[in-house]
Image: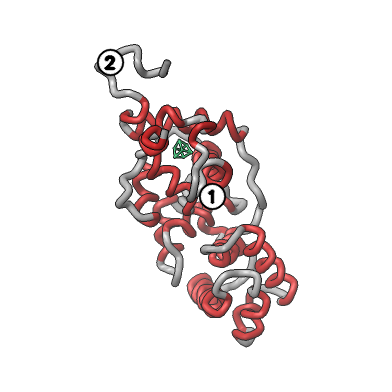
Amino acid sequence: MSLFDDDPALPSGPDLPPREKVLLVHDRLCAEYHCPIPHFHELDPLSELVSSLLSHRTKNADSGQAFRNLREAFADWPAVRDAPVADVQATLAPCTWPEQKAPRVQEVLRRVGEERGELNETSLDFLEHLPVPEARAWLEQLPGVGPKTSAAVLSFSRLHRRALPVDSHHHRVAQRLGLIPQSVDVGPAHKILEAQLPAEWTAQQVYDNHEVLMLHGQRCCFYQNPECRRCPVLELCPFGLARL
Ligand code: SF4
């Protein structure tokens, strides 16, 4: 028996409006994955920006290795910026597309240095004092920085601000659950999914929401053959119910 079939006049689980459904999904996935989820590192925001640029379409372990390589090979961020691009590219070998990411990282470091007048671990600390929309807009005027990266810098770095990143796992799970239409790509999904979350939620709750949807995509709602029969949100999921 479903939680929702007491009153047949009310929308049932899979048909709930997204703002109601997202709260139930959040609670069930938080129980499954043990919220609050700890932050996986505490980087300064400039380091988080570089780390995020390396993570595009790359497994976390590989982009993490590339980031460590970069930090070990060069004394500081100005040294990365000014190095021959081939040297930077060599350190990024564990990533996908190191030949594209090396010049992009150098370009971003140049722009940050020009705009802030300095290039070090505190160059982006000023973002802590801007309203989140302004901080995201500042980041998104940098080359190659879109909504996922701007949200990641604010949320995952030591700033711990209230911003919702959406990665490919999060996006897939949200589509299947009907939180966003199938036609909405990852970029535009950011605004829609963040607007569904209660305004009074803390930065930790918003971070948890991203983390549990991402973890669910990694551990149950696989791209191929999602394991719907053991899914704690099956009752809410039109995609999963249609597969039974
Ligand atoms: S029911 Fe299936 S498709 Fe829906 S969220 Fe769960 S695992 Fe994914």
Q: How crowded is mark 2: few (under 14 residues within 10 Å), some or many (20 or more)?
A: few
Kind of element beneath mark 2: loop
| Mark 1: amino acid | Ser
Query: Does the beta carbon at disc 2 come under 8 Å from ligand 1?
Result: no
Marks 1 and 2 sit apart, C-alpha to C-alpha, by 40 Å
- Residue 104 in percent (x, y) is at 51, 76
| Way the structure is coloured | secondary structure
| Residue 185 location, quadrant | bottom left
Residue sticking out furthest to the front: 244
Residue pictured at 60% horizontal, 63% vertical: 51
Q: Name the residue under label 2.
A: 8
**Closer to the camera in the image, 179 or 73:** 179
Residue pictured at 48% horizontal, 33% vertical: 26
114 on left or right of 180? right
- Residue 213 in percent (x, y) is at 50, 42
The answer to whether one can see residue 203 in this image is no
Q: Name the residue under label 1.
A: 155
Q: Residues within 10 Å of mark 1 (few under 14, many from 20)?
A: many
Kind of element beneath mark 1: helix
Quadrant occupied by the N terminus: top left
- Residue 99 in percent (x, y) is at 55, 80
The answer to whether one can see residue 109 in this image is yes
Residue sticking out furthest to the left: 9
**Closer to the camera in the image, 151 or 241:** 241
